[in-house]
Amino acid sequence: MTFASTLPELSAQTGFALSPLDRMSEIREDKQALADMNAAAQTRFVVIGRDRPILKRVEGGYDPFFTAAEAATIGRQRETVLLGKREDGQALFAIVLDDSAVDIVEVADEGGLIDTRKFVVPGRNDLFVHDLRAMATEGTVPVDIIGILGQAKSIMHWHARHRFCSNCGSSSELAAAGWRRECRVCKAMHFPRTDPVVIMLAISGEDCLMGRAGRFGKHMYSALAGFLEPGETMEDAVRREIREESGIRVGRVAYLASQPWPFPASLMIGCVAEALNRDIVIDHNELEDCRWFSRRDVQMMLKREHPDGYTAPHPLAIAHHLLRAWSEGRTPKF
Ligand SMILES: [Zn+2]
């Protein structure tokens, strides 16, 4: 899979980052304009059920864009959100269905990186309900479409879990074309969450630090990562997470790239960091293993040619791009 982009930054090469849409935030309060766009013949709808995009089976592949009439046949609809418009003026909305529209028919191992459970819309062999991460790695739809589906999945995950006001407990209502919820009782306004995660490579001379979580394959190593906490700078979070997971102290931190990660609604913030010591003390609650790898190791891991069978994450993940940039000498020098 290739991620073709004309944007100069590294972020644009990560999975879920590309989208052809203008989000049109300026018209979100204009109810008439929204109604006109919703009713326009060329408008299409992304349909989400139980946090998964629903696709139409079409000749030679899958189509995630439904007409309003097609979408109406799938199941009971809950919220509708404006995603944006394409350059040619076509508007795209997302619809989230009630959970009753989608059945889980096979509960498989959920412990891996990809959710392998099988979902169906009952009685509809013309539809395909698939995990978004699997769609991205399998190339089920083009990469810029994956970005649109990630946007839809994240915002609908939020709506499906925020139908009551977190301040007073009354039911809340959708506003601003789906980019806000409001409580009529206490007047509180609620906004969609994005959860920042730092993901980083500690660098010591010609080596970088990578770890392996238990859920990874036996030979896959990746960048360390963790959620940013309230009151922390990005740099503080990088230093804390590396210290906690590996015992390595960190000096300088430099930002490299970011990635929207719709599982369910994170922003991955990719950094490199200056390691101040080399003696690793693994936190076995977080990692099965953690070790230093050379640039040559990393280059072979990215190509899946390492003689010991070690591998690194898929190009879908920002970790892949951090590792590639470092192994090719394209990161700041400490
Ligand atoms: Zn309230």
Image (cartoon, rainbow, N blue to C red):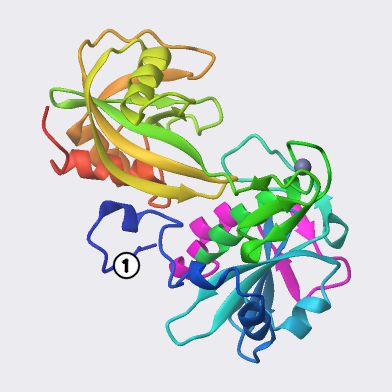
Determine whether the residue tagged by mark 1 lies in a helix, strand or loop. Answer: loop
Query: Measured along the vertical axis of the image, is residue 186 above or below residue 237?
Result: below
Read off the residue under disc 1.
4
Reply yes or no: does residue 266 show up in magenta: no
Q: Can see residue 40?
A: yes
Residue 309 seen in render: no
Left/right of residue 162 with respect to residue 207 in the rendered view? right
Name the quadrant of the N terminus: bottom left
Q: Nearer the viewer, residue 201 or 34?
A: 34
Name the spot of residue 192 as percent of width and height, x first. Answer: 60, 49
The reply, left or right, for residue 17 in relation to residue 100 is: left
- The residue most toward the bottom is 41
Nearer to the camera, 138 or 158: 158
Q: Nearer the viewer, residue 25 or 199?
A: 25
Q: Residues within 10 Å of mark 1 (few under 14, many from 20)?
A: few
Q: Quadrant of residue 308?
A: top left
Q: Position of residue 301 (x, y in %)?
A: 31, 39
Tell me the quarter of the image containing the C terminus.
top left
Relative horizontal placement of residue 100, taking residue 178 as reference (left or right): right
- Which residue is located at x 66 percent, y 48 percent? 189
Tell which quarter ligand 1 is in: top right
Q: Which residues are magenta?
A: 118-147
In x, y percent, where is residue 80?
Answer: 71, 67
Q: Identify residue type, mark 1.
A: Ala
> Which quadrant of the view contains residue 37?
bottom right
Q: Is residue 123 found inside the magenta-colored segment of the image?
A: yes
Please provide percent x and percent y for residue 129: 71, 63
Closer to the camera, 41 or 185?
185
Asked if 127 appears above or below 307 in the picture, the reply is below
